[in-house]
Amino acid sequence: MPSENNTPILQMQNICKTLSGKEILRSVSLDINRGELKVLIGPSGAGKSTFLQCINYLLIPEQGQIILEDTVVNPGVKKDLYNYRQQVGMIFQDFNLFDHLTALDNVAIALRKVKGMSKKQALEIARKELDRVGLSDKGDLYPAELSGGQKQRVAIARALAMEPKVLLLDEPTSALDPELVGEVLSVIRDLAKEGLTMIMATHQMDFARALADEIVFMQQGEIIERGSPAALLKEGSGTRTADFCNKLSDMCEELD
Ligand SMILES: Nc1ncnc2c1ncn2[C@@H]1O[C@H](COP(=O)(O)OP(=O)(O)OP(=O)(O)O)[C@@H](O)[C@H]1O
Ligand SMILES: [Mg+2]
């Protein structure tokens, strides 16, 4: 609904994180509105993964706060944290599936354990979510029997089953063979078009250019540039983002 679109659904305010005595995030702030896709880019070691992990409270920031809708999250209270994590899902580079469970059970297990659903109800939703990512015929296979792209789509189905308000994705295609990247990006594209709110770290600049509402460029633990893809990636704009993007494509050409 247009009236809701300008309200931040999630606000990160002055997030600071130190790891092994090194300041990794230096007071990073970012808001995301309902239905937006923000793409985090930046050199290796910039702090993108650390930031996403802080947003999900897999890492607890030393300073700063996160506000989901109108509520300040208190990660020190187990119940609040548990609740929050159901609403802010996370997709990792390396899928994080349970190897001993089928695709269907990987999706159903959280619904049973976290949402307390019956087996029948959980399986019904799991089937629907697998269908949504184009895997309706793979439910009975184990992760070892799936391609990387299929595994990542199972991980996405599992996150979607929880009906998150925001989905965080940390380089969801970077562990995939090049020919499998497209199938995962196509699922994420559909989610963006359906209006799912997402923050995604990626080096897939064509995807970012086409779909991001905002590109957020991080370097050395800070956001140093942000704006629309049109503004930041414009030829000759002289932005850090355009420069980084050119370096990335030079690197890809060298690899070809
Ligand atoms: N557990 C840790 N202890 C100490 N330093 C860490 C730890 N985890 C990450 N770092 C450091 O934090 C910095 C940011 O790492 P992070 O993984 O967030 O970067 P990134 O932007 O995601 O990079 P990439 O593009 O390679 O994924 C790096 O300098 C890294 O070495
Ligand atoms: Mg990373």
Image: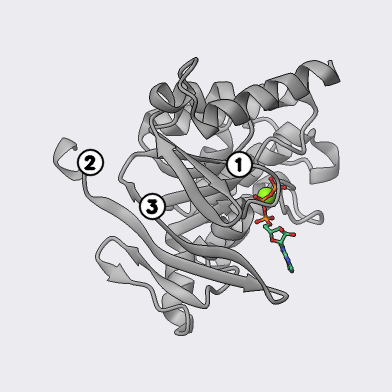
Based on the displayed image, in which of its 4 quarters is residue 136 positioned?
Answer: top right
Q: Secondary structure at mark 1?
A: loop
Query: Callout 2: few (<14), some (14-19), or many (20+) C-alpha neighbours within 10 Å?
Result: few
Q: Height in image: 26 above or below 174?
A: below
Identity of the residue drawn at 45% across and 41% down: 225
Amino acid type, label 1? Gly
Using the numbered discs, state the Cα–Cα distance from disc 2 to disc 3 in whole angstroms: 13 Å
> Quick check: 86 above or below 135?
below
Q: Amino acid at mark 2?
A: Asn
Distance from the alpha carbon under mark 2 to that under mark 1: 27 Å
Q: Position of residue 69 (x, y in %)?
A: 28, 60
| Mark 2 secondary-structure assignment | helix
**127 and 21: which is toward the camera:** 21
Give the crowd class for mark 3: few <14, some 14-19, many >=20 residues within 10 Å. many
* In this rendering, position of residue 91 left or right of residue 191: right
Mark 2 or mark 1, whichever is nearer to me:
1
Relative side of 178 to 3, left or right: right
Q: Nearer the viewer, residue 215 or 27?
A: 27
Query: Residue 170, relative to residue 23: is it above or below?
Result: above
Q: Nearer the viewer, mark 2 or mark 3?
A: 2
Q: In the figure, is residue 90 to the left or right of 182? A: left
Q: Which mark is residue 5?
A: 2
Q: Is residue 118 visible?
A: no
| Residue density around tag 1, few if under 14, some if 14–19, many if 20 or more, within 10 Å | many
Numbered tag placed on residue 165 in the rendering: 3
Residue placed at 46% from the left, 78% from the top? Answer: 75
- Residue 219: horizontal and vertical position, in percent? 58, 48
Residue under label 1, please give it. 42
Quadrant assignment for the N terminus: top left
Cα separation, mark 1 vs mark 3, equals: 25 Å
| The C terminus: image quadrant | top right
